[in-house]
Image (tube, helix red, strand yellow):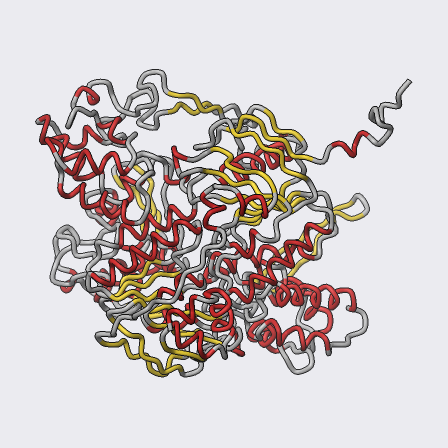
């Protein structure tokens, strides 16, 4: 009889489970994909942007692992968790616990800092509560999110089976929040003239605050509060004006409905000023920037902390001093700290800040707002908590971990990924950079194209095998851009004088106009501080940053770019009906699914079932709307078209629509010709979303276009197309400033500004300015050395 724990060869049966098997994956554009991913190895997934890499790694393997883990919790706990639908796949075997480290930006909560998201602040608070002099209270006394509270009354407690009552008078529960700025570190002054036009009445639209229309409930609330609706605000009495601007929340009754009236300023404080500017809608952000002046809180000097919290010190430094330090300096301070009784806590802190340095983030400070981190910085910050983990045999999933990294830093990231693998973990990485692909034990290449032209496995095997294969990735793996034979001559310059944002050291530099200018340097050298702090805010400058695109499942490329407006009007004009009929969110929506195309069935704690709407067949529109056609196609067929197909339809013939054609041409220009017009925004990859945003900005009138790492998420083959687009923009008379690390973009530039020489306070200076050929010839900076190695023999030719 054979032992059930051994296989037919006599070895342990458990040792046979060394693969993650995927069979018949159909998530998004995947076409019955089947792969076998080796465990305890580093597997890199490659392919052009939109080929299905993220759908396979994140949408299938990681999603199913997390769903199955959630199912192990009790029904009660599952009720508080997001319901995850099972991915469309026939078989998934050999899964292990998946830890996803993505590049989603940190939340834009103004109270969230690098210290709070990494738990460094929590450890420092405990340290100060134990050994800080003078001692002011528990850890919450050093928390800028906890206010100081005073209580009086009767305190009841159960002790020994009997209730005890204690009379408390003015008991103080110490918190660390600055009372002046509520722990935000800044105060705001509001320009009243930006809130209203005092020559007009409320009924006449005097209020200029976004969302305050007198046509709806606001008009009834203001009237119900006793404010004169037909009198110019300039004629208000002092009491009426005070009610309008400063009234505290007051219960009123309007048409038999209980409502709350609140003055404009306290209402704005809650809905706008207490939020991070970047989290606001663009039109609200513009209003806030126009109407308010933010300044450092004079009470706490921007530290967010109360006077009591700032008074407690260790070796002459308070907790704010430590949070302000560059992490590398904080590491040195902790190494010299010798406090008996808290050795384990100090050891934990040392390990944490050493992890910052190890991962290339030693230039950050703990008080840096989390919302200001780039996508790459956010991903590396999330990695910190995993570096010292004792977990093994888990699956780590990374989404382009080299984004935002200089070539010099990529080697360090590679070493970290290999270290996670060598601990016995499975490491899955979605990547485009040849330097990151080179360290893979196993490669899965998807394609051959993007969107509907992708979704199949083109190659599985070693890096050497990929290089020899005839796939798009294999052909481009050894691509090297050569330096330009001739560079453009600048037509002018943006003069930057005394730039001192973040770590910049009074930088004076001229950024040339009329050319392709690349700003580069190691991560943390001051590139973004220079461009966004001294260039982006100027008139005539349009910025395309890495900020995420907001949009629900009902949003798609057609709605986001504004393409649908001219298309609806063209349909309406051709058929003599209203444009609203051709909106699946308005009058034309299918009545059964409300224009969603699918019916969602909630099953309590079980996963939500999503089924195609039987009435419209998933087409989202009422049957009578689909009887109206333009150029032989109904509106649902148009939304199912790719950008390339729609460009042909609206570019000529009876459906010719110049306004729609112009939008479609811009989408083709940025390489999104394969994307379907009605494809939900959440299904687009990171690279696709950024190019979609770039397409919408190409129409802007600004003479200077600023791009923040436009190669993020781009395949090697797509970078060439991007360079062609940048050339066309410059040749059309605009100036392009690119913050970038990709050597192909540097080699193609007309002018390079290199910042450094290091990160944090070791950077902040312009260490080189000139042409790419001069940078390669100079080779005194890290960027110059890596660019010289990249272009190789091409450098001599170009010079």
Q: Is residue 588 left or right of residue 175?
A: left
Residue 629 locus on image (x, y percent): 16, 24
Res 10 → quadrant: top right
Seen from the viewer's position, the closer of residues 68 and 659 is 659
Q: 229 and 265: which one is in front?
A: 265
Q: Going 48% across and 70% down the picture, which residue do you hit?
A: 788
Residue projecting furthest to the top: 614
Q: Compared with residue 26, is residue 177 higher up or lower down, i.e. above or below? A: below
Judged left or right of residue 660, residue 695 is: right
x then y, percent, for residue 712:
43, 54
Looking at the rendered structure, the number of numbered marks drawn on it comes to: 0
Residue that appears at 66% across and 78% down? 313
In the rendered view, would you say 752 is above or below 235?
Answer: below
**Which image quarter is the N terminus in?**
top right
Question: Eyeballing the image, is 558 above or below 407?
Answer: above
Q: Residue at point 40% right, 51% down?
A: 548
């Amino acid at each position: 009889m054979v032992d059930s724990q051994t296989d037919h060869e006599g070895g342990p049966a458990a040792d046979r489970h060394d693969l993650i098997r995927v069979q018949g994956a159909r998530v998004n554009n995947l076409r019955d994909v089947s792969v076998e991913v080796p465990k305890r190895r580093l597997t890199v997934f490659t392919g052009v942007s939109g080929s299905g890499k993220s759908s396979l790694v994140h949408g299938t393997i990681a999603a199913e692992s997390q769903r199955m883990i959630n199912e192990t919790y009790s029904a009660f706990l599952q009720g508080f968790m997001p319901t995850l639908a099972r991915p469309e796949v026939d078989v998934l075997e050999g899964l292990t616990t998946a830890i996803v480290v993505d590049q989603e930006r940190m939340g834009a909560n103004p109270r969230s800092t690098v210290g709070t998201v990494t738990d460094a602040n929590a450890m420092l608070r405990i340290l100060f509560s134990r050994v800080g002099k003078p001692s002011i209270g528990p850890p919450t006394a050093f928390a800028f999110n906890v206010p100081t509270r005073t209580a009086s009354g009767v305190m009841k407690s159960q002790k020994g089976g009997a209730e005890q009552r204690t009379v408390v008078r003015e008991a103080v529960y110490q918190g660390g929040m600055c009372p002046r700025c509520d722990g935000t570190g800044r105060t705001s002054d509001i320009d009243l003239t930006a809130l209203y036009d005092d020559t007009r009445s409320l009924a006449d639209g005097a209020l200029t605050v976004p969302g305050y229309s007198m046509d709806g409930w606001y008009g009834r609330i203001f009237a119900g509060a006793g404010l004169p609706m037909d009198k110019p605000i300039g004629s208000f009495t002092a009491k009426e004006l005070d009610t309008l601007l400063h009234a505290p929340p007051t219960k009123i009754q309007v048409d038999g409905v209980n409502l709350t009236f609140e003055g404009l300023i306290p209402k704005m404080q809650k809905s706008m000023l207490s939020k991070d500017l970047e989290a606001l809608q663009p039109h609200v952000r513009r209003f806030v920037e126009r109407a308010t002046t933010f300044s450092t809180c004079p009470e706490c000097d921007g530290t967010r902390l109360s006077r009591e919290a700032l008074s407690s010190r260790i070796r002459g430094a308070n907790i704010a001093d430590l949070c302000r330090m560059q992490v590398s300096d904080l590491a040195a301070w902790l190494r010299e700290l010798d406090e008996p009784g808290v050795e384990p806590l100090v050891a934990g802190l040392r390990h944490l800040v050493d992890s910052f340095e190890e991962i290339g983030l030693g230039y950050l400070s703990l008080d840096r707002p989390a919302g200001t981190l780039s996508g790459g910085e956010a991903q590396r910050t999330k990695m910190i908590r995993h570096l010292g983990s004792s977990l093994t045999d888990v699956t780590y999933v990374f989404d382009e971990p080299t984004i935002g990294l200089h070539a010099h830093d990529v080697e360090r990231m590679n070493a970290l990924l290999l270290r996670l693998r060598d601990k016995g973990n499975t490491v899955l990485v979605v990547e485009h950079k040849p330097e990151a692909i080179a360290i893979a034990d196993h490669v899965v290449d998807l394609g051959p194209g993007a969107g509907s032209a992708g979704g199949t496995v083109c190659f599985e095997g070693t890096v050497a095998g990929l290089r020899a294969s005839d796939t798009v990735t294999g052909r481009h793996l050894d691509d090297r851009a050569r330096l330009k034979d001739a560079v453009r001559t600048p037509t002018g310059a943006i003069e930057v004088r005394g730039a001192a944002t973040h770590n910049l050291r009074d930088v004076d530099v001229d950024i040339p106009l009329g050319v392709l200018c690349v700003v580069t340097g190691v991560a943390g050298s001051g590139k973004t501080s220079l461009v966004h702090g001294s260039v982006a805010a100027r008139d005539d400058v349009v910025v395309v940053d890495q900020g995420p695109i907001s949009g629900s499942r009902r949003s798609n490329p057609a709605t986001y770019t504004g393409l649908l407006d001219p298309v609806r009007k063209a349909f309406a004009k051709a058929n003599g009906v209203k444009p609203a009929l051709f909106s699946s969110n308005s009058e034309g929506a299918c009545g059964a699914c409300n224009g969603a195309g699918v019916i969602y069935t909630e099953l309590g704690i079980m996963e939500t079932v999503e089924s195609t709407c039987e009435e419209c067949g998933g087409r989202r529109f009422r049957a009578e709307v689909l009887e109206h056609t333009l150029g032989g196609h109904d509106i649902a067929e148009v939304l199912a078209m790719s950008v390339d197909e729609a460009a042909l339809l609206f570019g000529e013939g009876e459906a010719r629509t110049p306004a729609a054609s112009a939008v479609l041409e811009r989408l083709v220009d940025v390489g999104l010709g394969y994307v379907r017009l009605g494809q939900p925004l959440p299904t687009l990859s990171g690279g696709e979303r950024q190019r979609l945003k770039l397409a919408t900005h190409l129409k802007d009138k600004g003479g200077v276009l600023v791009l923040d790492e436009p190669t993020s998420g781009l395949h090697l083959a797509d970078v060439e197309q991007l360079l062609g687009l940048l050339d066309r923009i410059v040749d059309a008379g605009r100036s392009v400033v690119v913050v970038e690390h990709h050597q192909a973009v540097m080699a193609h530039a007309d002018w390079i500004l290199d910042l450094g020489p290091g990160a944090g306070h070791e950077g902040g200076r312009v260490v080189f300015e000139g042409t790419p050929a001069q940078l390669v010839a100079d080779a005194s900076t890290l960027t110059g050395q890596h660019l010289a190695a990249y272009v190789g023999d091409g450098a001599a030719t170009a010079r």
